[in-house]
Image: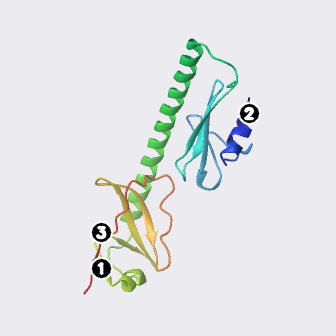
Amino acid sequence: MSNLHETMAAVGIPYPPARAKPTSNGFLRWDKNNRYWLKLLDGVALFGDFNTGESHQWFENDDKPLDAEQVAVRRAKMLALRKEMDEELLQQHEKTAISALNQWNGLPETGSSPYLEKKQVRALGLRFDEDALAVPIRDNLHMSSVTWATITSLRNSLHGGQKLSRALACYPTR
């Protein structure tokens, strides 16, 4: 039987530091931008990495044979954890979407950009933020996050936002 620390290390996820505080629904989140997450429930753990989208499960005493009733109990616990995880992600996406919309609404609609000049395009549906372009990330018609494009890079989007699609509406200036 492997312990949770070993299982997490085996997939490249560090164990949470003692200072990691649980969220309102009991998830532990830690590292830069709360990258990693863990939820424990009665000998069952669900853990993963928000950046890569991976998730893993761990069961206490997983080296012992289980009867049908024990398998059903374990399955129910895992389904409960997955449901809580989905709710946590939904809350995180909603908070990020509100933050993105607030930031977006505070940015000017006109300006210049070395990025657009280099690409020889004009932008539709973008905003300007000093030397960067603010690019909306949308889920259908709803903004889920914002990312920033500069002449040298595409900066990260807001932490916690859905990254379902990225669209930069540019048209040639020629």
Tag 1 near tag 2, CB within 8 Å: no
Q: Which of pointers 3 and 2 indicates the residue nearer the eye?
A: 2
Q: Residues within 10 Å of mark 2 (few under 14, many from 20)?
A: few
Q: Residue 97, percent across and down?
A: 41, 53
Front tag of 1 and 2: 2
Disc 2 target residue: 3
Rendering coords of residue 112 (x, y %): 37, 83
The three-letter code of the residue at mark 1 reads: Arg
For the C terminus, which image quadrant? Answer: bottom left
- On the image, numbered disc 1 is attached to which residue? 122
Label 2 sits on a secondary structure element that is: loop
Q: Would you name the residue on which mark 3 appears?
A: 125
| Amino acid on which disc 2 is placed | Asn
Residue depicted at x 67% and y 49%:
12
In screen coordinates, is 146 left or right of 173? right
Q: CA distance from mark 3 to mark 2?
A: 50 Å
- What kind of element bears circle 3? loop
Q: Residue at x 59, y 15 (%)?
A: 70
Q: Tell me if residue 59 comes above or below residue 121 in the rendering.
A: above
Of badges 1 and 3, nearer the viewer stands 1
Q: CA distance from mark 1 to mark 2?
A: 55 Å
Question: Residue 134 location, x and y as percent?
Answer: 40, 69
Q: Which residue is located at x 71 percent, y 35 percent?
A: 4
Scheme of colours in the image: rainbow
- Residue at left 32%, top 78%? 110
Q: Are the residues at dot 1 and dot 3 in contact (C-beta closer than 8 Å)?
A: no
From where the camera sits, is residue 15 visible?
no
Q: In terms of sequence position, does the residue under pointer 1 or pointer 2 come before the other?
A: 2
Which tag, 3 or 2, sits closer to the chain's start?
Answer: 2
**Residue 117's quadrant in the figure?**
bottom left
